[in-house]
Image: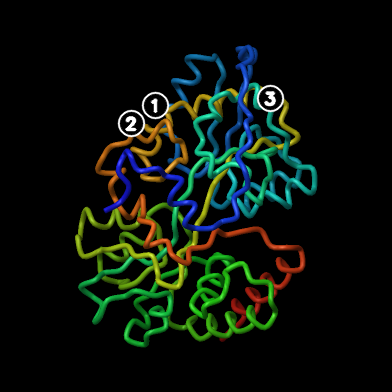
Amino acid sequence: MGYKANTPIRTLIVVLALGLLAAQSACGTATTPPPKTTDLIFRNWGGDISPEILAAFEAEYGIKVHYLPYETQEEAIDEIRAGKVYDLVVLENQLIPPLVADGLLAEIDYGNVPNFRNISANFRDLAYDPHNVHSIPYSWGTTGLVVRTDLTERPVTRWADLWDPRYAGKLMGWPLPRYMLGIALKSLGLSLNSENPQEVEAALQKLIALKPHITLRDWEPAVAAPYLIDGEVAIAVGQADDVTAGQEANPAIQYLLPEEGAILWGDNFTIPANSPNNKAAEQLIDFLLRPEISAQIINATYYWLPNDAALPLVNPEIRDNPAIFPSSASLKNAEILLPLSPEGEALHAAAWERFLAAGQ
């Protein structure tokens, strides 16, 4: 199961029918590294990139990297909008277009990022940032269900199983509106990116019915694992790191991509428009896109980086793990989380406020 080293990754993405456009060549000759006195402020998830990798970059280029983890990406966005200065920020796909529209992200000079050539062609030129003018893919993965199979009376296969009364009080999700409303939409056979008021209303009512029976905990890597291990939770909304962490303690913890369709997420490198260190930030991106560096990140985090050149260097037990590299069949009906229009954003935000107020 899973993808072998000689299996083209692009086959997986073609199956998803994500509306990918033709890949654009954006590589060039590397420029002279920025001055050795340059410091960089890098905002990303905590633990995603090891201090050893950043130290290697600092030793090679004389550029000090200040790694500042955020609790949520929305936190970083609020700070960017408030004028705080950061040089490199990792952001999810759907969060990028509003910042671009408001002139808050810089255009990337690909002359400073020749290792962009290592990015899989099927991850370039996506709808949220045509021609990768303002972003470079960093990592991607799936959101599905993590299950204690010894605590469920029958196989769990669908998002709709969250509404099975047998599991009331043994469920866990995240307080993230796009994900939770998206799950409700998918459970109804609808698109998680729907902006149809009637469809969003139906999803809201379904989510309100679930509210008394599910605990929402702030997202962080492997957040569900301890609750699954101790049996407090039987089914959790989760990702591959939840199951890889949980299985070390209990092999009954399994990961599945629901039949109605998994949620696909992707993170990207972006440079805020007010950064005074664009070239240094681009140099760091280029360093992280080196095959051996990207492979180190994958081996440490279990997140897939869409770096074709890195794949042969990934540990086989990770590369062949279907929770991390899912099969094409398991991704049937999967959808990528896309940005909403301003009207759609308002619709989803209003629905989420009603969900939070329900039952109070």
- Which of discs 3 and 1 lies nearer the camera? The answer is 1
**Looking at the picture, how far across and down is residue 128, in whole percent?**
66, 51
**Pointer 3 residue:** 277
Q: Which is more toward the observer, 8 or 154? A: 8
In the current view of this chain or complex, which residue is farthest to the right? 102
Amino acid marked by disc 3: Asn
**3D distance between C-alphas at marks 1 and 2:** 7 Å
In screen coordinates, is 254 left or right of 219? Answer: left
Indicate which disc residue 292 carries.
Answer: 1
Q: CA distance from mark 3 to mark 1?
A: 25 Å
Q: Residue 155's x, y, as percent?
A: 27, 76
**Measured from the top left, where is residue 246 in percent x and y?**
27, 57
The earlier-in-sequence mark between 2 and 3 is 3
N-terminal of the pair, mark 3 or mark 1, is 3
Q: Is residue 76 above or below residue 289?
A: below
**Residue type (three-letter) at the residue carrying disc 2:** Leu
In the image, taking residue 205 as reference, residue 340 lies left or right, namely: right
Instruction: Select label 2 or label 3 by which is in front.
Output: 2
- Which quarter shows the C terminus? bottom right
Q: Secondary structure at mark 2?
A: helix
Q: Quadrant of residue 133?
A: top right
Residue underneath mark 2 = 313
Residue 219 vertical position relative to residue 159 in the rendered view, above or below? above
SS state under label 1: helix
